[in-house]
Image: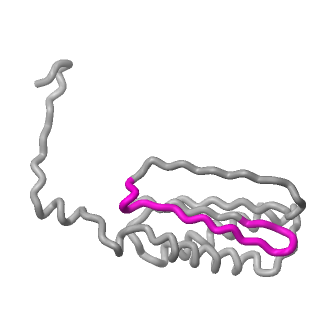
Amino acid sequence: QPAGGRAAFRHPVSVQQMEDTEVTEESSFSQEAVSALLKEAVESVLGSATYNHAKVPQWTSNVIEEAMQRLKAQQQPFKYIVTCVIMQKNGAGMHMATSCFWDNSSDGSATLKWDNKTLYCIVTVFGLAI
């Protein structure tokens, strides 16, 4: 036993177990596929919407719900986090940044910036392999 009274446990890992946990192309996050899915979700909710401050809370919820439904329908082994920002086009600046500590070989993110004449919609998905 190491100092502090804690027992050290070691579990041997067989070669077969290691092969089973290797990341395959099918289980890695596809930024291209998720971006296309996000575009479909945003367009289905916002279409040709004109910016209306009172409708923004419902629009953001609907975009997130639509994106999540489409992600779940893909039946990929991921947990998802979806964010959505809708902003009026009025010349104001906006800066966004994200940072993640994860496994680059399996996890990933995709961000879509969508706009029309009166608004911007920025949706981000983080996919964390299960």
Residue 17 horizontal/vertical position (percent): 15, 61
Residue 19 appears left or right of 28? left
Front one among 56 and 50: 50
Residue 69: give x, y in percent of width and height.
Answer: 55, 74
Name above or below for residue 101 compared with residue 85. above
Who's the residue at 60% across and 64% down the image? 111
Whether residue 130 is visible, yes or no, is: no
**If the image is split into quadrants, where does the N terminus sit?**
top left
Residue 116 is a magenta residue: yes
Q: Which residue is found at the position 17% from the left and 21% from the top? A: 5
- Residue that appears at 73% across and 66% down: 121
Residue 84 x/y as whole percent: 67, 61
Q: Where is 100 relative to 129, above or below? A: above
Q: Can residue 17 be seen in this view?
A: yes
Q: Which residue lies furthest to the top in this view?
A: 4
- Vertical relation: 30 (above or below) 14: below
**Quadrant of the image occupied by residue 115:** bottom right
Corner quadrant of residue 75: bottom left
Q: In this view, does 35 lie to the left or right of 55?
A: left
What's drawn in magenta, residue-wise?
A: 103-121
From the image, which quarter does the C terminus lie in? Answer: bottom left
Residue at the spot 43% in from the left edge and 59% down from the top edge = 128
Asked whether residue 102 is drawn in magenta, I would say no
For residue 91, side relative to residue 29 (left or right): right
